[in-house]
Image: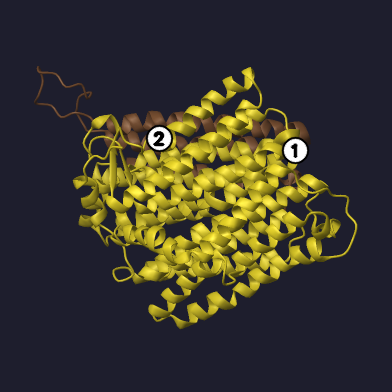
Chain colours: A yellow, B brown
Amino acid sequence: MSFIPLFFVLPLLSAFLIPILGKIFKPLVWIVSTVVSFILFIIALYGLSATRVIPMIVYKMGNWPPPLGIVMAFDSYSALMVLVISILVFAGCLFSLRYMSHYTGQWKFYSLLMLMTAGMMGICITGDLFNMFVFLEIAAISSYALVAFGVGPEELEASFKYMVMGEIGGLTFLLSIALIYAKTSTLNLADISNSLQAIQGTTFFWMILGMLLFAFSIKAALVPFHSWLPDAHPAAPAPISSLLSGVFIKVLGIYTASRLIFNVFGLSRDTAPLFFNILIGLGFLSIIFAGLTALNQKDYKRLLGFSSVSQIGYIMLGFGIGNFNGVAGALFFILAHGVAKGLLFLTSGAVVNATGTRELTKIPGLGESMPTTAWSFRIGALSLIGLPPLVGFFAKFLIVLGAVEAGYLWIAIAAVVLSGLTLAYLLKIENNVFMKQGKTNAKQAPYTMRLAMVLLVVLALALGIGFLPIVEWVISPAAHALLRGLEYSQLVFSSMTFSF
Amino acid sequence: MIIFGSCIVLFLIGLYAIVTKRNLIKIAIGFALIEYAVNLLFALIGFRSGALAPIITKLDTTHAFVDPIPQALVLTAIVIALGTTALMLTVILRIYNHYKTFDIAEIKKLKG
């Protein structure tokens, strides 16, 4: 028996058990989802240590050999993503206990949350293209429902907009799967990468790649296709916003795109410089445009939503630079931004829970009445801006280092200078909400909410101070897994079965 | 080749409906069109002229078989499409209950 299927079997199982358990004893829904997310975290740690021994752990569904059956391929990159997902789901569950207590139908919330987790986990560990699409739709559909969870006019409208954009992306992905299948007659990622080498560089090859990039740009909310995110993420309940911005867009957009570009299509900076320049261009467009738009926002969560679009640009920038430090920086940024933005959205939830409004100008003076929330916000913001002892600094530093090594001095300078934009829009929240003197009726956030925020604050500090072992054990194996390119397929076919 | 091209044309018609139509129900119909287009393309990819259904028997080994995998994929894709369409229509109905209209221009509360 292997541990790999547990990643999506456990959340799927709990997603369908929660409605039954909720009928028996109401608090059980929260207990089950929190315990399951904690178990997932433990398994993710175990998987991380296992990938240090065996670079590629393959699980064959129904014991069919790789090209015929569906395989689950678990390498260091999957381990990194699974770890980030489980951390944020656990923090979100902790936070939900009090935040969701005034909503009705809580079992629906936890059931959808677990379903979304199952989908995200599945995307990260699957080694099959169509399976990836199915998991992507599981995650996407449950997220549409979660965005509309409040069923107010604003939530419904945001959900509809999100659904329209997201489904265009999803169906374009399905269309490109059809075209890939027509050319290669296989769905296994490793087998596809072998077959695609024959048509590398043809018009058809670039057409499929272009369609995939379009689909995943929508899912990742890169700038020309970002319009759904600043509506959808604020409309969702705060723990869900933190999950959506923290990991969801990265798993559905960045992970899928980078896995296909590097390991399946086998592109690298040396073989396709133009394509990687396009990625850099998309990255800069996101950073600048969304950053400037964020400056104009008057809504706490909407500002953070634009900030997510802007920060996704940095990840794309790292992948676009394409050398080892650039890619490692992008992967570290996924972890760093997940923790920091997850934390910031949780503080927004605490503020909304205490004051009932998200408008920045209406809630001055919270720095005194909600000290934990204020300091959590400050640490999260400083990590996002990239201040030295925090995790965000080292992620950005690796990207800048990669840019300098690749000879793009101007990218390095621009990436550092544009941090000023991040500073500017986050200061707007700090000034209006936490620093400004004023009287707002607000009580200290409940115990479990503070616990969830403190957990992420500690992570942001710990990952920053202990960045050397993190880079060595987690980030650089993941970057190696991506940059080994077409060797991915050999590893999948040759790897042995692994058991506990 | 024309028949594959017509699938793409159907896809684009659906996309046109989604982008230009102002009625929420018509946008949902646009999605249905796109889903049909992709499913049709899948089924066509597996099609072989004059081939048999993919049930391997000892009696007839001379004929080619139709590729069964795309058909399995289409079934899965149909189920997913059912889920999204159901959710989308539910959201549309809830929006209608709030605003008493299907016109997208009249329910623009969010900007940007």
- Judging depth in this view, the residue of A183 and A106 nearest the camera is A106
In the image, is residue A323 above or below residue A144?
Answer: below
Residue A99's quadrant in the figure?
Answer: top right
Q: Nearer the viewer, residue A470 or A137?
A: A470
Percent of width and height locating residue A471: 42, 64
**Viewed as shown, does residue B70 lie left or right of A198?**
right
Name the secondary structure under disc 1: loop
Across and down, in percent, residue A441 comes to 88, 50
- Residue at x 36% of width, y 70% of height: A323
Instruction: Mark 1: give few (<14), some (14-19) or many (20+) Cα within 10 Å.
Output: few
Task: Say which element carries label 2.
Answer: helix
Q: Tag 1: residue type?
A: Gly
Q: Is residue A340 above or below residue A152?
A: below
Residue at screen point 66% across, 34% down = B92
Residue B67 drawn above or below residue B53? below
Chain of the residue on which disc 2 is drawn: A
Residue at point 52% right, 40% down? A38
Q: Nearer the viewer, residue B34 or A142?
A: A142
Nearest-to-viewer mark from 2 and 1:
2
Name the foreground residue: A71 vs B91: A71
Could you tell me residue A270's position as x and y percent? 30, 71
Residue A396 placement, left or right of A308: left
Q: Which residue is mark 2?
A: A6
Number of residues whose C-alpha sits closer than 10 Å to that of mark 2, classed few (under 14), some (14–19) or many (20 or more): some
Q: Which residue is mark 1?
A: A152
Question: Horizontal and vertical percent for residue B67?
Answer: 24, 32
Give the quarter of the figure containing the N terminus of chain A.
Answer: top left
Residue A231 visible, this angle: no
Amino acid on which disc 2 is placed:
Leu
